[in-house]
């Protein structure tokens, strides 16, 4: 149920691509086009401070799979529709 008192902060726009290789290629293609993509977030168990607890790669395979495939697209209040169209176009080109 939608509550008008609650709304998105429009902070992140994450997507998932097919695999890690696709992510690397799309990420670089978007960066090369001047589009400020990023990757959010490293799984908690892989954060440096958590290594002292003995967590290792493979402990949380679903979180790790998500991280390998995730890209955060630009999202901010002043992003114009024309800029959104460019992001979509470049992303489509990178994924085709």
Image (cartoon, helix red, strand yellow):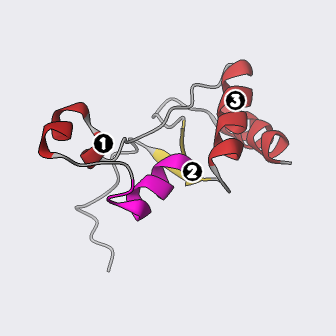
68 or 51, which lies in front?
51
Judged by depth in the image, the label closer to the viewer, 3 or 2, is 2
Q: First in sequence, mark 1 or 3: give its number.
A: 3
Q: Distance between the residues labelled 1 and 3?
A: 26 Å
Q: Give the side of residue 12 with respect to residue 16, left or right.
A: left
Q: Give the side of residue 48 with respect to residue 53, left or right.
A: right
**Prevalent SS, magenta region:** helix
Image quarter of the N terminus: bottom left
Q: Residue 76: horizontal and vertical position, in percent?
A: 46, 34
Number of marks in the rendered image: 3
- Region rendered in magenta: 58-69
Secondary element under disc 3, as helix, strand or loop, is: helix
Q: Distance between the residues labelled 2 and 1?
A: 16 Å
Q: Residue 69 got which mark? A: 2
**Magenta run includes residue 51:** no
Q: Residue 84: horizontal and vertical position, in percent?
A: 66, 39
Q: Give the side of residue 18 with respect to residue 3, left or right.
A: right
Name the residue tied to disc 1: 46
Disc 1 crowd, CA 10 A, few/some/many (<14, 14-19, 20+): some
Q: First in sequence, mark 2 or 1: give its number.
A: 1
- Residue furthest to the bottom in view is 1
Which picture quadrant has residue 58? bottom left
Q: Residue 30 got which mark? A: 3
């Amino acid at each position: 149920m939608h509550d008008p008192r609650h709304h998105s902060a429009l902070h992140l726009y994450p997507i998932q691509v097919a695999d890690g290789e696709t992510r690397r290629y799309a990420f670089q293609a978007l960066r090369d086009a001047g589009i400020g993509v990023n990757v959010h977030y490293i799984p908690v168990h892989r954060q440096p401070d958590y290594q002292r607890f003995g967590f290792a790669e493979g402990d949380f395979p679903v979180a790790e799979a998500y991280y390998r495939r995730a890209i955060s697209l630009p999202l901010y209040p002043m992003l114009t529709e024309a800029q959104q169209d460019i992001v979509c176009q470049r992303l489509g080109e990178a994924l085709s």
